[in-house]
Amino acid sequence: MSSAALLHINQVSYRFPRQPQATLTGISFSLAAGEILGLLGASGCGKTTLLRLIAGFMVPTAGTIQLADEIVAGANHWVPPEARHLGMVFQDYALFPHLNVQRNVAFGLRQWPPSQRQERVRQVLELVRLQDYQARYPHQLSGGEQQRVALARALAPKPRLLLLDEPLSNLDSHVRQQLRLEIRRILKTTGTGGIFVTHDQEEAFAVCDRVAVLHQGRIEQIGTPAELYQSPASRMVAQLVTQGNWLSGQRQDDATWQTDIGPIAGVPTTAAVTSKCELLIPQENIRLEADDQGEWVIWDGQFLGREYRYCLGTHSGQELHVRVPQGQMLPVGTRVRLRVKSEGIKVFAAQD
């Protein structure tokens, strides 16, 4: 492990007692100091189990977990959670209802001298922008404010790594968008490494430096948000991280495919893809032009602020979804023809 690495997971597996299949199999990755890694996947893929193994709440069936230069799990060695010097933020805030904000944040600092404890509470409340809320109780705070207090409490003891288990899932959409940017700002300001569990692709991309996509207990792909979006390693990753249209294709030549929306040229592929394939076409790659003779009809449309999202019908009866800039508004029922930009289209082998 590099001397700059904060966390190293090596071939970690876990199987619940009396379960025939492992929940996690052969998980390996490293986390650099100050880096934020997202664990992204559908429910049941093993995200929270992996987080609990790192925290020390569970013991891996196989493999090792190393924090800095210390093995904390595996190789006949196990360090309890309280000795790992980690912070944790849960989706349900887990604040003490009978303690005010100041005492909630100070809870993990009981061994600190009073003057240092008071100063540290002041610092972290200022960091999460709640310095004027010290005397309030959890029931007097909004959900977003409660989660900020939970974040301050987790950061107060200066943990070497912060674990966040779907911390925004109980908040409404507007608060989630604000707080995910705040979480990234706070972690980067303090230089604290983080592991952020979520099932929301947009959330993972907004908060994290890298994202590991989990599927059926394995890491399907790990990389930066741009790498995952631009070069998904599998159909599963592509389905999870992109908003696109899946169309069957028949090869015409090395870079041209016949599809339900006509031939698409300029789409290179790999040798692994034979004559039949599935093309993933990003919604923003399709442009619409009103045409009374057009074969496609706009069935529905939604205004999304900076853009419109339209639903059209294809020859085979599939739904085709298109995103266009705000200025291009077309009424439902309009006949259109399509222009497809080939850049960014991905080709995958057809599924049996």
Image (cartoon, grey):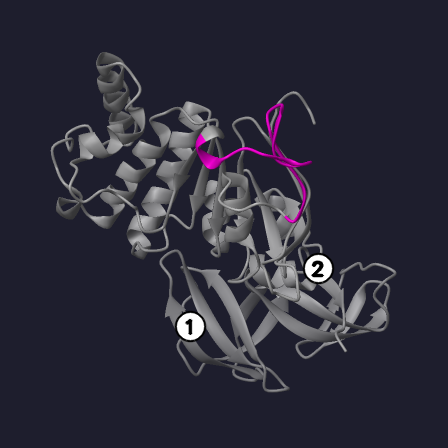
- Find out whether residue 66 is within the magenta segment: yes
Residue at image position (25%, 43%) is 95
- Find out whether residue 281 is within the magenta segment: no
**Structural crowding at the residue carrying mark 1, measured as other residues with C-alpha within 10 Å and reported as few (<14), some (14–19) or many (≥20):** some
Res. 70 image quadrant: top right
**Structural crowding at the residue carrying mark 2, measured as other residues with C-alpha within 10 Å and reported as few (<14), some (14–19) or many (≥20):** few
Instruction: Name above or below for residue 173 compared with residue 188.
Output: below
Res. 253 image quadrant: bottom right
Residue at image position (56%, 56%) is 46
Q: Are marks 1 and 2 in contact (CB under 8 Å)?
A: no
Query: Hey, what amino acid is under mark 1?
Result: Leu
Residue that carries the numbered disc 1 in the rendered image: 330
Q: Earlier in the sequence, mark 1 or mark 2?
A: 2
Q: Position of residue 326 (x, y in %)?
A: 40, 59
Q: Nearer the viewer, residue 26 or 335?
A: 26
Classify mark 1: helix, strand or loop.
loop
Q: Position of residue 293 (x, y in %)?
A: 56, 84
Instruction: Name above or below for residue 274 compared with residue 51.
Output: below
Instruction: Name above or below for residue 267 compared with residue 113.
Output: below
Q: Is residue 307 left or right of residue 143?
A: right
Classify mark 2: helix, strand or loop.
loop
Q: Position of residue 99 (x, y in %)?
A: 17, 37
Q: Quadrant of the C terminus?
A: bottom right
Residue at image position (27%, 30%) is 107
Q: Which residues are magenta?
A: 61-82
Q: Quadrant of the N terminus?
A: top right
Task: Say which mark, if any, is on residue 234.
Answer: 2
Query: Hey, what amino acid is under mark 2?
Result: Ser
Q: Position of residue 117 (x, y in %)?
A: 26, 19
Q: Nearer the viewer, residue 181 or 155?
A: 155
Instruction: Name above or below for residue 140 compared with residue 131.
Output: below
Q: Is residue 76 left or right of residue 118?
A: right
